[in-house]
Image (cartoon, rainbow, N blue to C red):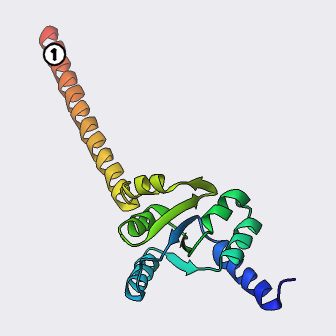
Amino acid sequence: MPSQSNKEYLEQTKNRLKDGTAFYFTDFTGLNVQNMETLRRELKQHNGNYVVLKNTIGFLAMKELGFDETTVKTLFSGPTGIVIAIDDPIALAKIITKHENLKIKGSYIDGQYFPTEQIIEFARIPSKEVLYQQVVGSMNVIGSFVNVLEGIIRTLIGTLQAVHKKEAK
């Protein structure tokens, strides 16, 4: 029978995890304290957290939150830390993939499981800001194209009016 303190720890863990849109499961064995603190600071700047959990409690919390029991069980083997993304999971993927000593086990993004290889691919996707800039840049190109077309139409109308006036004389 679980102790009261473990029940409370499980509830606290579920509360920490429930707001996450993405969870990156990592093995932090190669990180020293200084690297761990640097990682946590970088994650906080992008609205993320890094938590180290007891495997049983982490497994039970994820299971109670509705994640696949079999996959979650494999992710909670050995030392496990979870990166929790609240907003932008891609920004956090970029951060965790640049830390050499942090081994990525897998992730859940919007409830779907992704293996390590796909997380590395996600890290190559440009950030939201860059994507927004690309969209705005594309709109500027479209706006320029519309202006060119308007100029052609104005010139055509002017030419047609001149020909009409000439024929009217």
For the view shown, which residue lies furthest in the front direction? 78
> In front: 144, or 47?
47
Location of the C terminus by quadrant is top left
Residue 156 visible here? yes
* Residue 65 falls in image quadrant: bottom right
Badge 1: how crowded within 10 Å, few (<14), some, or many (20+)?
Answer: few
Q: Quadrant of residue 73?
A: bottom right
From the viewer's perspective, tell me whether residue 153 is left or right of residue 116: left
Dot 1 falls on a residue whose secondary structure is helix
Q: What residue does disc 1 label?
A: 165
Q: Residue at x 73, y 60 (%)?
A: 69
Expressed as whole percent of the image width and height from the top left, the position of residue 166 reads 12, 12
Say which residue appears at 43% left-offset and 71% top-offset: 102
| Corner quadrant of residue 163 | top left
- Tell me: residue 69, above or below residue 32: above
Residue at (77% x, 68% y) in the render: 64
Position of residue 49 relative to residue 74, above or below, is: below
Check disc 1 and give the amino acid type: Lys
